[in-house]
Amino acid sequence: MQISFSKQQGNVPVIVMHLEGNLDASNYTDVIKKAQESFDGGARDMIIDLGKVAYISSAGLMSLHTVSLIFAGQSLQQNSSGRPTFRSLDPNRDQAAREHLKLLNPQPGVEQVLETVGLKEFFHIFTDLDTAVNSF
């Protein structure tokens, strides 16, 4: 998994996290860590570009949800080994999460997984970067 960043300016500054490779148990904590570093550095709105992610596992899904909670200003839950744990979705609590994290260009297989597990309705998903940036 390669992770890179770019900055975009719309109504507010937006960080774009570009992912390349499979998003799974071998690297999901890297995505969470990099997102936390961006948030700690002052970023408040993020787009995750999934255009070069061909496969996403349940751990990858958890990383997307966890990043949304980070950008909503919520604390992370961790298990005894220090790894992030999944927190159930709550429409009231998670509204802020949807406002500060958007997804861009998921490939058909990834979009199918998002739909199957109900996250396609949770996240705002865009196919155009400018539209995504201006949605904040």
Image (cartoon, rainbow, N blue to C red):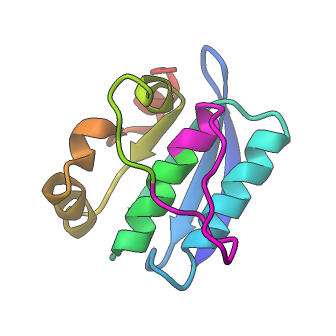
Q: Residue at x 52, y 20 (%)?
A: 136
- For the residue pair 120 and 78, the one nearer the viewer reads as 78
Secondary structure that dominates the magenta span: loop
**Residue 63 percent across, percent down from the top left:** 50, 61
Q: Does the rendering let one see residue 53?
A: no
Residue 20 sits above or below residue 40 on the image = below
- Residue at figure coordinates x 67%, y 52% from the top left: 35
1 lies above or below 107:
below
Quadrant in the picture for the N terminus: bottom right
Query: What residue range appears in magenta?
Result: 68-86
71 magenta-colored: yes
Drawn side of residue 5 relative to residue 87, left or right: right
Looking at the rendering, which quadrant does residue 89 occupy? top left
Taking the image as shown, residue 42 lies to the left or right of residue 34, namely right
> Percent position (x, y) of residue 95?
41, 24
Query: Is any part of residue 122 visible from this angle?
Result: yes
